[in-house]
Amino acid sequence: MKYKEIKIYPKKEELDALVEALNAAGRSDLVINDPGELEGIMRAREEHVWDYVDPEVIED
């Protein structure tokens, strides 16, 4: 299957509207990478919520 990857860097408050617009345009297969989410995962590891974090999660 061929696909095109497009990277868009919206502000957090613009994300919901962007996803809606992309879905309306027929682009429903989306991957959203949130750096804040990664920080939360790493902080949770330090607080012993997670005992292991896969190295692939923190790769850029």
Image: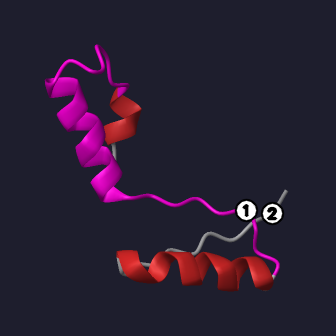
Q: Is residue 40 magenta?
A: yes
In this view of the protein, can residue 15 be seen by the observer? yes
Above or below residue 12? Residue 14 is below
For residue 36, side relative to residue 25 (left or right): left
Neighbour tally class for label 2: few under 14, some 14-19, many 20 plus, Cα within 10 Å:
few
Residue found at x 23% / y 35%: 42
- Mark closer to the observer (1, 2): 1
The disc label shown at residue 29, or none:
1
Above or below residue 39? Residue 7 is below
For residue 29, side relative to residue 36 (left or right): right
Above or below residue 40? Residue 28 is below
Q: Position of residue 46 (x, y in %)?
A: 14, 26
Q: Quadrant of residue 49?
A: top left
Residue found at x 38% / y 58%: 34
The residue to which callout 2 is attached is 2
At label 2, the amino acid type is Lys
